[in-house]
Amino acid sequence: MKRVLAQAKVELILTLRRGESMLVTIGIPVGILAFFSLVDVLPHGSGKAVDFLVPGVLALSVISSAMTSLGIATGFERHAGVLRRLGTTPLGRGGLLAAKCIALLATVVVQVIAVVVVGYLLGWKPHGDPLLAAGLVVLGVLVFAALGFLLAGRLRAETNLAAANGLFLVFLLLGGIVVSMSKLPSGIASFSRALPAEPLATSLRDALGGSAVPIRALVTLAIWAVATSLVAVATFRWD
Amino acid sequence: MIHVSSLTKRYGALVAVDDVSFDVAPGELFVLLGPNGAGKTTTVEILEGLRKADDGTTIVLDAPAGSRAISSSVGVMPQESDLYAGIKTAEALRLFASFYDDPEDPDALMERFDLDRVRKTNYRRLSGGEKRRLSLAIAIVGRPKVVFLDEPTAGMDVEGRATTWSIVDELKQRGTTIMLTTHLLDEAERVADRVGILHRGKLVALGSPSQLTSGRSTELTFSGDADVDTEALGAAIGARVARAAKGVYRVANMPPTPRLVSDVTKWFASRDLLVRRLDVGPRSLEEFYLEVTR
């Protein structure tokens, strides 16, 4: 455990030190939240913009840290031989994975605090269940971290970089994060509901808006969590 | 300490390691030699647990190679391995030190490895030699019983190499079992207790440097121009003259008598050619190596 925590601390320090990681995990989500709350250009249906945006941006934060930031970093570390080298030490592969997950959860806590604080400052009024929302965030971390590892464990580092950024953009636009699903053409909306981003954003929005979380969204997330984890474990290459 | 028997590794149709067997005794310094692509790194990486063998047995410290149980007693310096681009030298060494129960003092190691000046430098800004020295420091920070060093001096300048060999010497004094690969034959000859030579995946020679070089009858070797007419010379002295390397020749299957030396030099004089070096001593490891890996 001492080893895992030492590794987790270094992983966290390195994440905070990487400018591009901070931009994608904090800068872009908070920037999107602030910009579209203050500038009323988005077709987000009825109600205040910030109430619509905060749950979506929480989902986007999870996607950015678990899939984009962690996935890209892991891809380059694999390419550089960092993963295989750590795997030969008493830390081991399991310890390394555990450390990455701990550092990721710590990053997500920082993100959630940043989004919630900025949301409050912009007039966000949550009236839902924070524990349920926290549970959904953890489920989302599982799904998108598995997706990030899946890409990082197989693709070339540069291809992985492009894929993780491209998916981030797809999820941002089609995930019901800034654009309400009701504004998407029905074919695209159905496609998007089958992806993991929309179920996460929608269920967070319902949980924080005081409505019942749709079973459909939870089932979709659970399927993604199990499927991506299994594929990632089966296909991950350490070098 | 290390036991390898009938080790085989294939990459598709290529047999990278072909039925290789050897043992390394406790405290021994074993050097694996061979041309690029001979299978040195594959062999070492299987022993480190980085690759899986297709066939054969590999035991390190009484456990299957690469098993978790021995990871705290095994130090690894891979040939091609980088660290986190953004980690600082001191952070990296402290991190790896924290994985072991009784590690070396990272500060003392940094001083020993001449990494003091770059302790706060990001890994990506280190020079090639500094990266290799840090990699070696990481390999030994846990006070391992067995160390695998894959081309430890590659990419190092003269001073870095000297530091590395003195560290290897220290490890050996302490009783550490060391297995390393190199292509520097003179260094191998100087430091190795025993040498294994790999060629196209097969172990073609195994023994101490002196066994390998003097265990056979001595022969006359000489160097001259690159285009000496070996057939004409062979006819003149009544023996076969073989080319050992560029500009280096040896007289095969004939003891180096005074008569033979005289005949060879006479032949050169008759053609107004200069013999640059003439040697009747035991072959150097380099000559032996070139012979078995040709």
Image (cartoon, coloured by chain):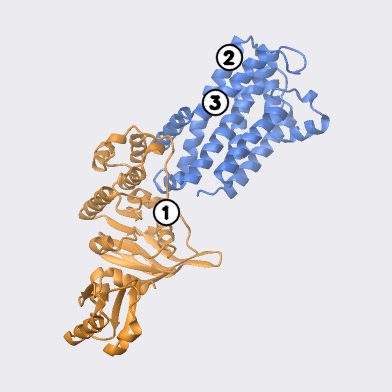
Chain of the residue where label 3 is placed in the rendered structure:
A
Q: Position of residue B230 (x, y in %)?
A: 33, 82
Q: Residues within 10 Å of mark 2 (few under 14, many from 20)?
A: some
Amino acid type of the residue tagged 1 in the rendering: Ser
Mark 2 secondary-structure assignment: helix
**For residue B7, side relative to residue A60 (left or right):** left
Residue where numbered disc 1 is placed: B67
Residue A132 pos. (x, y %): 63, 23
Which residue is disc 3 drawn over?
A23
Please provide percent x and percent y for residue B102: 28, 42
Say if A149 sits above or below A25 in the image.
Answer: below
**Mark 2 touching mark 1, by CB under 8 A?**
no
Q: In whole angstroms, how far apart are the C-alphas of marks 2 and 3?
A: 16 Å
Badges 2 and 3, same chain: yes
Tell me the amino acid under the disc marked 3. Leu
Which numbered disc, 2 or 1, marks the residue closer to the eye?
Answer: 2
- Rounded to the nearest angstrom, the CA distance separating label 3 from label 1 is 40 Å
Residue at which label 2 appears: A118
Nearer the N terminus, badge 2 or badge 3? 3
Outermost residue on the left side: it is: B258
The answer to whether dots 3 and 1 both sit on one chain is: no
Q: Chain of mark 2?
A: A
Residue B108 at least partly seen: yes
For marks 3 and 1, give the one nearer the viewer.
3
Chain (orange): B
Number of residue marks = 3
Q: Residue at x 47, y 62 (%)?
A: B53
